[in-house]
Image (spheres, helix red, strand yellow):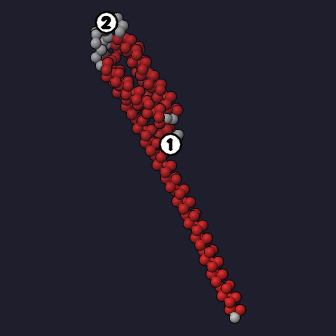
Amino acid sequence: MQDTVAVALITSLSTLAAAALTGLVGALSTRRQLAHQLTVARQESVERRATRRDELRRDAYVGFLSACDQAYRQLDRRWLEAGGTGPVPGYDEAYAAMRAVDEAYNLVLLEGPAAVEAVARSVLTSLTLEYADQRRFRDEPGEATVPLRDRHRERWLAAIEVRTNRRIAFVDAVRPVLDGGE
C-alpha cells in the first residue's frame, strides 16, 4: 500500500509540477507578447507624433511663404505708387501684410528647427527693411507723380533680388526638414 501511496504522491506532484511549469511558460509567453505589443504601440505613437509634427511644420512653413507672398504684393503696389506728402493709399494693407508675416514667423519659431528659424528671420528682416525704405522714399521731396520704382530703380531691383534669394534660402532650409532630415 505504501507503494501505491508513493506512486500516487509522485503522480500528483508531477502533475502539479507540470501545471506549474505550464503556467510559468504561459506567463512568460504572455509577458513577452505584451512587451512586444507595448513596443509596437510606442513605435506607432512616436510615428504619429512625428507625422503630426511634420504636418504642423509644413503648415507653418507654407503659411509663412503665403504671408510673404501677400506682403510682396503689397510692397510691389507701393513701388508702383508715386511719392509725395499726401495720403498714402495702401498703407493699411501693407502694414497688415507685414503683421501677417510677423505672425506666420511666430509659428515658424515654434515649429523650428533653428536653421529654418534663422532663414525665416532673414526673410522677415529683408521685408521689414524694404518696407522701411519705401516709407522713407515716399517722404522724400521730389517728383510726386513718378512711381517709387522709377525714382529708386537700383533699390527696387536690389529689393527684388533680395526677396528671391531669401525665399530660395528659406525653401532650401525647409526641404531637408520636411524630408525627414531633422
- Rendered image quadrant of residue 25: bottom right
What is the secondary structure assignment of the residue under circle 2?
loop
Q: Are marks 1 and 2 in contact (CB under 8 Å)?
A: no
125 over 28 or under it: above or below: above
Q: Is residue 171 visible?
A: no
Q: Earlier in the sequence, mark 1 or mark 2?
A: 2
Question: Which amino acid lies under the numbered mark 2 shown in the image of this protein?
Answer: Glu
126 over 153 or under it: above or below: below
Label 1 CA crowd tier, 10 Å (few <14, some 14–19, many 20+): few
Q: Which of the image's four quarters has the N terminus?
A: bottom right
Q: Nearer the viewer, residue 42 or 158?
A: 42
- Determine which residue is flagged by label 1: 180
Question: Which amino acid lies under the numbered mark 1 shown in the image of this protein?
Answer: Gly
- Determine which residue is flagged by label 2: 143
Where residue 115 appears, x then y in whole percent? 52, 32
- Rendered image quadrant of residue 156: top left
